[in-house]
Image: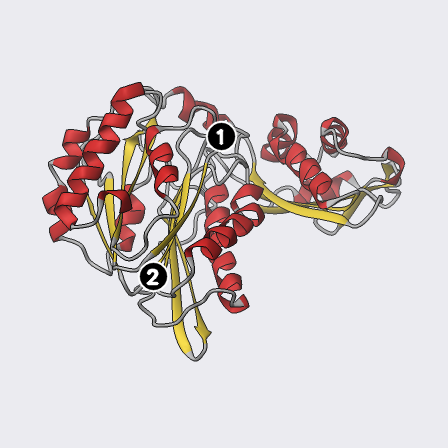
Amino acid sequence: MTDPVSPLAPARFPDMPLVGGVRFASCAAGVRYQDREDVMLAVMQPGTAVAGVFTRSATRAAPVLDCQAKLGGETKGQAAILVNAGNANAFTGAHGQASVAAITAAVAQATGVAADRVFTASTGVIGEILPHDRILNHLDQLTTSLDPAAIDGAARAIMTTDTFAKGASAQVKIDGASVTIAGIAKGSGMIAPDMATMLVYIFTDAGHDQTALQGLLGRLTDQTFNCITVDSDTSTSDSLMLCATGAAGVDATGHAEFEAALEQVMLDLAHQVVRDGEGATKFVEIHVSGAASDTDAKTHGLAIANSPLVKTAIAGEDPNWGRIVMAIGKSGAEADRDRLSIRFGDILVAEKGWVSPEYTEADAAAYMKGQDLVISVDLGLSDGSATVWTCDLTHRYIEINADYRS
């Protein structure tokens, strides 16, 4: 059964600008799914700088290990990325490494890209050998259909339990030249901060020093993808890659305008992943202030965001603020019960360790009926702050994951 599109989804896939120096293709290889595209290929022009951030899972998949080993190398030649959906090629031992080697070699031969500049990713079921021959049988189709305007097909091809394709873009002027950034993502379940916990591919026609690009991507990941959670579970296959082709003829290294635009694209994609959380009906921003440090604030925020009791109360539109108090108390970060205040939107729920005299349950219950909710917590300790994003936990999440391999 096809899951209905999330009620939090955007109206449609956005119009995406062309990014100079990159071409896309997608096809239906039948890796697991039938009658839908499930493999995408992107090929970038010579001189493209490639940066990546990956899951820190101790059981990460063979494609992740291969990508990590290749980063930081020569940037003079072309680069390519191939992604399949339906099979994660994870926990497959030597078979997983063999599949990566076969795909990498075949892509290199078909595209002329050096094998050490071919990056792969797989997403889907863990523990099943990847039938990579199905991918190799479609490489001619992929290479002959490469098109700068085909990013939307690439976004659809990397979906698993996603209910909509995810894309975001931005354009900015640097030294008088127009620079474009465009990205796609997949992610719906098994989403928690430990890198990005999804697959994300971002492309820009700006030039950029590779070492600086790697540092920038890491910093912005901590502010975006590492601030979202759907279910507190971290995948074996998560990969976030950023490719700077240089086709715009301008070097964006160190330009604040470029960094701000890149952060905008990354945050947009991160929010879309939460809005497609498996079974989600509510998008929730949790803002924590007044903490002893920014780190403590994030710890508190994630404790709230990952609490099944908080998430099910949100699903039931129940303003059960006691569960937020509970989550703060268990987080392990510093807190003082008698300095704590909580708000639902603009509604002051509790202050100084006690329910606010102005609070009414009816007002809070009415607020909880909205699709986009904001929960604010002030610890009253110092000036540490953080914002994280999550969704509610519904019975549909159980159905999706109970039937995932059926």
Q: Nearer the viewer, residue 400 or 379?
A: 379
Under mark 1, the amino acid is: Thr
Residue at x 39%, y 74% (from the top left corner): 178
User: Residue 295, how many percent across, how many down?
Assistant: 69, 41
Residue 271 in the figure: left or right of residue 359: left
User: Residue 216, how many percent across, how many down?
Assistant: 51, 54
Question: Measured along the vertical axis of the image, is residue 21 above or below residue 387?
Answer: below
Residue 278 visible in the current orientation: yes
Under circle 1, the secondary element is loop
Residue at x 61%, y 26% (from the top left corner): 308
Q: Quadrant of residue 69?
A: top left
User: Residue 115, how many percent across, how many down?
Assistant: 23, 43
Q: Quadrant of residue 366?
A: top right
Residue 390 in the figure: left or right of residue 49: right
User: Residue 196, how many percent across, how many down?
Assistant: 48, 40
Residue marked by disc 2: 16
Dot 2 crowding, Cα within 10 Å, few <14, some 14–19, many 20+ = some
| Quadrant housing the N terminus | top left
| Callout 1 touching callout 2 (CB < 8 Å) | no
Residue 32 visible in the current orientation: no
Under mark 2, the amino acid is: Met
Question: Measured along the vertical axis of the image, is residue 337 above or below residue 8?
Answer: above
Residue 283 in the figure: left or right of residue 114: right
Label annotation for residue 234: 1
Q: Does label 1 or label 2 sit earlier along the sequence?
A: 2
Residue at x 51%, y 28% (from the top left corner): 233
User: Which circle, 1 or 2, is nearer the viewer?
Assistant: 1
Dot 1 crowding, Cα within 10 Å, few <14, some 14–19, many 20+ = many
Q: Nearer the viewer, residue 86 or 366?
A: 86
